[in-house]
């Protein structure tokens, strides 16, 4: 019996050490050497304090900032833990809404997003990402069309020339990876940081 157990125990110990310890430590070490910033979460610091990550969107509600796309993330309701409430860009609960095209809740949310942006005078053209959430609910990127549609409202709120704000957006456009993968996009968090630096 022991002769049958010994190889199994040796293999468990060996593969646990190899795949559970050595491999993760080696990959972590390589990541720290090759791309430490990305391996550590692409954190953004100002005055020695972490203010966010370029990989995770934030909920900008002020008229002085560009708005990201809606977020479907939720959190437990403090009044009733068996229910959830909407908490935009809740990084501890990354997920999409899982609502299908026939869902009344989805249709109502999309219509409310459009009405909110129009009512606030923020946009006059609706880009798809102005009303729809990303799969993770945390995407910090929007389309250049959505960013440019917000330029007049941002310029007015900050008393800046529209041309200056438009140029800032155009500088922040990230092109397709390798020229053909993905779509052009603008990181709202980085765009708003640059906006605060405008004089």
Image: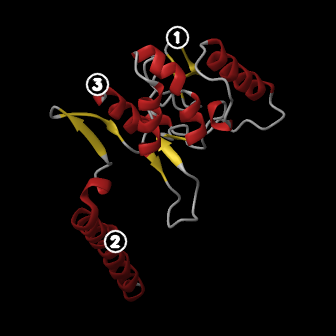
Q: Are marks 2 and 3 in contact (CB under 8 Å)?
A: no
Q: How many marks?
A: 3
Residue 119 found in image quarter: top right
| Residue closer to the observer: 24 or 1 | 24
Q: Which residue is mark 1?
A: 79
- Identity of the residue furthest to the left in this view: 48
Residue 6 in the image: x percent, y percent? 35, 84
Q: Is residue 53 left or right of residue 59?
A: left
The residue mark sitting in front, 1 or 2, is 1
> How many angstroms separate mark 2 from mark 3 (CA)?
57 Å
Is residue 69 visible in the rendered image? The answer is: no
Residue 8 — which label? none
Quadrant housing residue 49:
top left
Q: Position of residue 180 (x, y in %)?
A: 58, 65
Residue closer to the observer: 55 or 152: 152
Say which residue appears at 59% left-offset and 13% top-offset: 120
Q: Secondary structure at mark 1?
A: loop
SS of the residue at dot 2?
helix
For disc 1, the neighbor class at 10 Å (few under 14, some 14 to 19, many from 20) is few
Q: SS of the residue at dot 3? A: loop
Q: Which residue is mark 3?
A: 199
Answer with mark 2 or mark 3, whichever residue precedes in sequence: 2
> Which one is in front in this view, the residue at disc 2 or the one at disc 3?
3
Is 16 situated left or right of 179 in this image? left
**On the image, numbered disc 2 is attached to which residue?**
16
Q: Tell me whether the residue at label 3 lies in contact with that at label 1, contact meaning CB atoms closer than 8 angstroms.
A: no
Quarter holding residue 144: top right
């Amino acid at each position: 019996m022991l002769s049958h157990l010994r190889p199994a125990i040796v293999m468990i110990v060996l593969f646990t050490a190899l795949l559970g310890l050595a491999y993760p430590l080696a990959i972590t070490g390589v990541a720290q050497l090759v791309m430490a910033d990305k391996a550590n979460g692409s954190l953004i610091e100002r005055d020695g304090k972490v203010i966010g990550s370029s990989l995770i969107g934030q909920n900008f509600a002020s008229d002085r900032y560009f708005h990201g796309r809606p977020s479907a993330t939720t959190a437990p309701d403090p009044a009733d833990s068996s229910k959830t409430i909407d908490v935009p860009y809740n990084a501890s609960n990354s997920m999409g809404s899982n609502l299908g095209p026939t869902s009344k809740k989805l249709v109502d949310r999309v219509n409310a997003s459009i009405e909110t942006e129009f009512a606030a005078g923020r946009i006059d053209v609706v880009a798809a990402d102005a009303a729809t959430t990303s799969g993770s609910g945390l995407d910090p990127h929007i389309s250049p069309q959505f960013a440019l549609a917000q330029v007049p409202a941002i310029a007015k709120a900050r008393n800046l020339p529209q041309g200056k704000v438009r140029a800032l957006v155009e500088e922040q456009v990230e092109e397709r990876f390798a020229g053909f993968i993905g779509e052009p996009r603008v990181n709202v968090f980085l765009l708003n940081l640059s906006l605060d630096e405008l004089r």
